[in-house]
Amino acid sequence: MRLKDKVALVTGGGSGFGEGICAKFVAEGAKVLVVDRNLEGAQRVAAALGPHAAAHPADVSRKDDALAMIDAAEARFGPLDILINNAGVSHLPGPTEDVSEDDFDRIVAVNMKAIYLATRVVVPRFKSRKRGVILNMASTAGVSPRPRLSWYNASKGWVITATRALAVELAPFGIRVVALNPVAGETPLLKTFMGEDTPEMRAKFLSTIPIGRFSRPDDLGNAACFLCSDEASMITGVAMEVDGGRCI
């Protein structure tokens, strides 16, 4: 029960890594608002987790939705302790010059602007309580970029830098800011990263991961639980690699 009585909000909680984080947090005693653009997915996850979880629909790239989701978490469960900025998108692998402006704008809106919007809402609340944790989902792509995913790579590098900058700024107010760098995982985004989900493409990806498997939702849930718990009270500004050795 490392998160007993903590209140958390997880964006992109209706599937993949977000679902794994929600499940681990509830198991460790937290109350969780499962936020997803896909309300059906969020409701499925919340229903499976019981009374300590609730679903909420949001487009995290919209200012009004960012405010509404945080208000909803606090109205349902009480003051927010943990914000997990997990929602993310990618573009299909391809030459930089072939990535459309619409795809680029979507990457910026979901992977970057959404973190800005949610952080802007929670920081004054966390400051008033002199506590709080923000965890951002970055990626090994921000540390060791793969070719043909340039703008996705760049967005995750931004997440890592934003995490470190916020950690320094907010530490005097009792607020910790951390990130996770997963390798490609068994999530809905896997096919997007690879371009096509074939045995050959999977083997190519797995050959770059020394441990020899993709990351799983429970891997990210376990790492997030530690970083957001009081056990990690001296840890801020890190971007922890959960990557089976990919970035070594």
Image (cartoon, grey):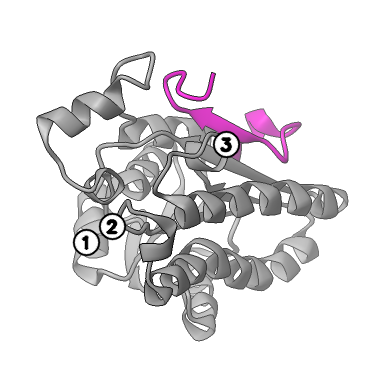
Residue beneath disc 2: 14
Spatial distance from mark 3 to mark 2, Cα to Cα? 26 Å
Residue labelled with disc 1 = 41
Q: Residue furthest bottom?
A: 64
What SS does tag 1 mark?
A: helix
Q: Residue at point 67% right, 71% down?
A: 120
Extent of the magenta region: 227-248
Task: Say which quarter of the image contains residue 194.
Answer: top left
Residue contact between numbered discs 3 and 2, judged by CB atoms under 8 Å: no
> Residue placed farthest to the left in the image?
199
Q: Residue at x 73, y 46 (%)?
A: 164
Vertical comparison of 36 with 25: above or below: below
Q: Amino acid at mark 1?
A: Gly
Element on which disc 2 rests: loop
User: Dot 3 corresponds to which residue?
Assistant: 143
Tell me the amino acid under the disc marked 2. Answer: Gly
Q: Earlier in the sequence, mark 3 or mark 2?
A: 2
| Sequence order check, earlier mark of 1 and 2 | 2
Looking at the image, residue 16 sits to the left or right of residue 121; the answer is left
Q: Are marks 1 and 2 in contact (CB under 8 Å)?
A: yes
Task: Using the image, tell me which numbered label, if any, was put on residue 227.
Answer: none
Nearer to us in this view, 219 or 7: 219
Specify few, some or many for label 3: CA neighbours under 10 Å numbering under 14, 14-19, or 20 or more.
Answer: some
Q: Give the Cα separation between the discs numbered 1 and 2.
A: 4 Å
Q: What is the x, y in percent for residue 41? A: 21, 61
Residue 238 lies in the magenta-colored region: yes
Give the vertical position of 211 relative to 112 (above or below).
above
